[in-house]
Amino acid sequence: MADNVSIARRLYDGWNERAFDEIVQYAADDAELTIVGTGDVFRGKDGVRKYNENWATGFPDGRVAVDRVHGDGDTVVVEFTGQGTHTGTLATSMGDIPATGRSMTLKLCDVIEFRDGLIARQRSYFDTGSMMAQLGLLPEKLTTSQKK
């Protein structure tokens, strides 16, 4: 059986390959995946699939690269970078975000808790403000150097 760090790494490789059936196999039946910034929770294997498919639909050319992994028993922390072009609709709890055609690079961090070799809980941390700004969905920031 694979160790927790190897399973965690495989999740990100699987996402790049769009191997959602494989990703779901690593989730416990009662898994919970939480987007910390919004409080959105995806439950069970269907929720894990939906979360991953939402990102792949919004960013069809999207790729993730694992930057660092740290494992301690049943907890694995993964820092990674996601890149892609927003050419599809991104489904969110606040409504669908239609394609903007903009490219985005986002730093993310997941904390994954395992139980009996399966993912029981996953918390995903990322800067939603940076994401929205890169997609052109926030007003331009005013700077102090602008004349009145």
Image (tube, grey):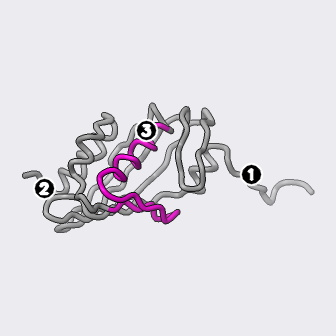
> Is 89 placed left or right of 64 in the picture?
right
Whichever of callouts 1 and 2 sits on the residue coming sooner in the sequence is 2
Whether the residues at callouts 1 and 2 have beta carbons within 8 Å, the answer is no
Q: Secondary structure at mark 3?
A: helix
| Residue at the image point whose x is 74% and y is 51% from the top | 139
The amino acid pointed to by label 3 is Ala
Image: magenta residue range: 32-57
Whichever of callouts 2 and 3 sits on the residue coming sooner in the sequence is 2
Horizontal and vertical percent position of residue 53: 40, 42
2 or 3: mark nearer the eye: 3
> Is 137 placed left or right of 8 in the picture?
right
The local crowd at label 2, few if under 14, some if 14 to 19, many if 20 or more residues have their Cα within 10 Å, is few
* Disc assigned to residue 139: 1
Q: Is residue 48 magenta?
A: yes
Horizontal and vertical percent position of residue 4: 17, 57
Horizontal and vertical percent position of residue 129: 60, 56
Residue where numbered disc 3 is placed: 56
Residue where numbered disc 2 is placed: 3
Residue 74 drawn above or below residue 84:
below
